[in-house]
Image: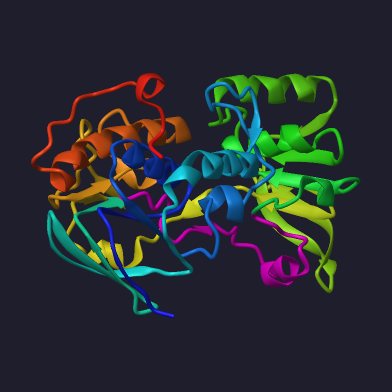
Amino acid sequence: MAQELHTDVAIIGAGPVGLFAVFELGMLKISSVLIDALAEAGGQCTALYPEKPIYDIPAHPAIAAGDLITRLEEQIAPFATPRLLGRRVEGLAGAPGAFTLTTDQGDTIHAKAVLMAAGAGAFGPNRPPLEGLEAFEASGAVQYYVRRRDDLAGKRVVIAGGGDSAVDWALALKDIAKVSVVHRRPKFRAAPEMASQLDAAAERGEIEMVIPYQLHGLHGVDGVLTDVEVATLKGETRRLPADVLLPFFGLSMDLGPIAAWGLDREMSHIRVEAATCQTSLPGVFAIGDVATYPGKLKLILQGFSEAAMAAHAIHPIVHPDQALHFEYSTSKGVPG
C-alpha cells in the first residue's frame, strides 16, 4: 500500500552506511525515513554475502557482514525509523527544506533534506563471457555471492578474480573446501594483509594458485559442473576439476532514475564536497560507495565517517534557528 510520510531526512539506501546515518542523524534530533529497493535492510551485506568476514570495522578483528547489520539495527532501534523497503525512488522535486520524493510503488515522502547512501545503486554482478553460462547459473554451479559458507563444504571450488571478495572467500573456504584461485597476474588488488595471508596459505598447500590464467570455458552436463577451463594470454589451456565456480569480477552499477536528477557525476558515482558530502544539488547529500571526491576510499568505515559529516551539514537545513553545539556521545547519551 502506498504511503505518504513527512520526515526531516529521506535516506535512500538501507545498507550499513544508510543504517549508521539513522544513528548520526538521530543523535542530532533529526528524524529520517529509510528507503531501499531491496525487501530487507542491509544492502549487499544482507543480500549478497551475509557470512563474509569484514576485517576493517573498529573493535571487531573480524565480523560477518550479516552480524554487522544486526549490530547496526540494535544501535538505531531507539529511533524507531520508518522504512519503505522494496521501493525504488523515482522522482525528486523541491528545494532544501521542502523536497518531495516519489517511489515506484506510489509512495510520497516529504523531507527537508535527502541523503543518498545507495551503495552501488541497483547492483548486479559482472558476468564472465562464457558459453553455456546460464545453465550453470540456474543450477547453482556458478554463483556470484556466497549466502552460506557451509553450503560449499566438501566442494571443489574455483574462485576467479583478484580483488577483496576473491581473496576473502578463498581464505574463508580453504578449511572446508578444495579451493583454486584463478587470476591473470601474481599481484592482487585486495588489502595487503589479506593478500599476504593468501600467499601464506598457498605456500602451505591449503589453496591452489592458478596464475597467470583467465576463465576460458565451463564443462559439464545439464548444469552439473565438472571442470573449469582456464587459459593464458598465449593460449595455453588447462582444466580444473570443479563443482562450483565463484567469479568475483565486481558489480555493475546502475543509479537508475537518480541518474536523471542532474547531479554532477563521475562514471556511476556522484561527486560530493569532501567536507560536507553535499552534491551539486543543494540539500541533497551522498555518502558511502555511491559518493566520490579526491582521496575517497571505498571502505565501510569511511562511509560511517561520511554519515557523521553529512548529518552535521544537514542540521542547519532541518533546524535553521538552532546553533549546533558539538557534544560527545559519551556525555549526552542516546536520545530517548
Q: Is residue 152 left or right of residue 246?
A: right
Q: Is residue 58 left or right of residue 174?
A: left
Residue 71: give x, y in percent of width and height. 58, 38
Please identify the quadrant where the N terminus is shown: bottom left
Please identify the quadrant where the C terminus is shown: top left
Q: Considering depth in this image, is 249 or 228 the residue closer to the camera?
A: 249
Q: Main secondary structure of the magenta part?
A: loop
Does 107 sit above or below residue 207?
below
Residue 232: give x, y in percent of width and height. 66, 43
Residue found 63% across the figure and 45% down from its top: 66
Q: Is residue 51 left or right of residue 112?
A: right
Q: How many numbered circles are shown?
A: 0
Q: Is residue 277 in view? A: yes
Q: Which picture quadrant has residue 53?
A: top right
Q: Is residue 184 in view? A: no
Residue found 35% across the figure and 25% down from its top: 332
Q: Considering depth in this image, is 79 or 313 the residue closer to the camera?
A: 79
Farthest residue in the front direction? 336
Magenta range: 116-144
Residue 308: give x, y in percent of width and height. 32, 33
Residue 14: give x, y in percent of width and height. 45, 53
Residue found 60% across the figure and 19% down from its top: 193
